[in-house]
Image (cartoon, rainbow, N blue to C red):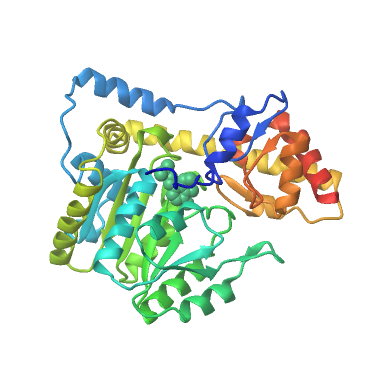
Amino acid sequence: RFADVAQAPPDPILGVSEAFKACTDPNKLNLGVGAYRDEQLKPVVLSVVKKAESKIFARNENKEYLTIEGLDGFRKATVDLLLGGDHPAIKEGRVAVVQSLSGTGSLRVGAAFIARFMKGSTVYLSNPTWGNHRNIFGDEGVEWKYYRYFDADTVGLDFKGMVEDLKAAPPGSVVVLHGCAHNPTGIDPTKEQWASIADLCKERDLMPFFDVAYQGFATGDLDKDAFAPRLFVEKGLEIMVSQSYSKNLGLYGERVGALVMVLNDKEAATRCLSQLKRLARALYSNPPTHGARIAAEVVNDKELFEEWKGEMRGMAGRIERVRGELQRALEKKYPSKDWSFITKQIGMFSFTGLTPVQVDNMTNKHAIFMTRDGRISLAGLNSAKVEYLADAIVDSVRN
Ligand code: PMP
């Protein structure tokens, strides 16, 4: 019966971690997966998370199921974070929110909603994008297409191409936009470009679906990193948003996130919430408790919230510092090439432009593990390894 089941290919991102684990080279470096590491390249549990957990444990809460839509304190916190507290949409009850299984699970609930209630709509993904977007929408049976995004010549945004492709999208299509710190390129539209994209979505009746996986992690500032979705709401657009606390609160394995719909009408929001609950009920019934309690504790407590912002600035700052160090090392070793893109890109990743063959050289010769699209996670780099990485890049580019 199962003899005909073919072997699935390894995941292009998580497969890199598996290969890294199996490697015995003492110099090995994992720049594949986007998980933050400290200067010793060790995983980090934020101090605010430990403090929140102490408070939670002291309350001795039970392990009963949450409701399908999740923990109320968390749902409030996550919308406050996204839109800014006291936002009119919140006061007017125009926001539907379900706590879901981190960014991925929230996107999947959104995809299921699109499949059921926006039948026949095409979802437009940036080219390139986070690899799992294709799986998430594709597995729901939603048709997806690319819009142009990355310009290899300028190592920047192909804004003209993006606008052309979105203008050509049929009305009623969905446009997936990375809220900030685009993965994998690290290139975001400027404020002016965001405004044009919003206007275009309005004119062409496109539904923006923001993937917000790095709020506060990109620049260290929660408000700055929420600029785009807030602008779209301000311009009267109805949006869907998936939020993740994997990176900014370091809750990766706890699976904490939400799917949010900001609508123009309260009754529609109520009905959409009821349908999101219906979809979630069949997918996983109700979301996990622990991580949501942590996030709610941190966001809703003034002191912890301030401390969290400091810790986020610390993470974003370390990444920015190693970006600078890597750029300077490369400029020294290979001055004829322009390496300034490294510090122009933001967030966790740098899109190096290395070809798959060059990436193979990085891994096979230098034990540096990264995805074959040429993306490196700077969260996995420290000062001690900058020279080693720069030498390997130069060796790979030259050969
Ligand atoms: N979207 C993007 C763009 C991401 O980079 C990630 C994490 N790599 C996610 C969503 C979802 O991650 P998680 O499911 O851990 O929240």
Residue 247 percent across, percent down from the top left: 45, 40
Along the line of sight, which residue is nearer the eye, 225 or 269?
269
Left or right position of 374 against 333: left
Along the line of sight, which residue is nearer the eye, 162 or 276?
276
Residue 376 percent across, percent down from the top left: 64, 44
Residue 360 percent across, percent down from the top left: 72, 44
| Residue sitting at x 57%, y 72% | 159
| Residue sitting at x 75%, y 53% | 339
* Relative to 368, residue 117 above or below: below
Residue 202 percent across, percent down from the top left: 36, 77
Query: Could one spot residue 180 in this view of the protein?
Result: yes
Left or right position of 162 against 389: left
Q: Quadrant of the N terminus?
A: top left
Quarter of the image for residue 393 reads: top right
Left or right position of 262 against 379: left
Query: Could one spot residue 33 in this view of the protein?
Result: no
* Relative to 291, residue 143 above or below: below
Quarter of the image for residue 153 reads: bottom right
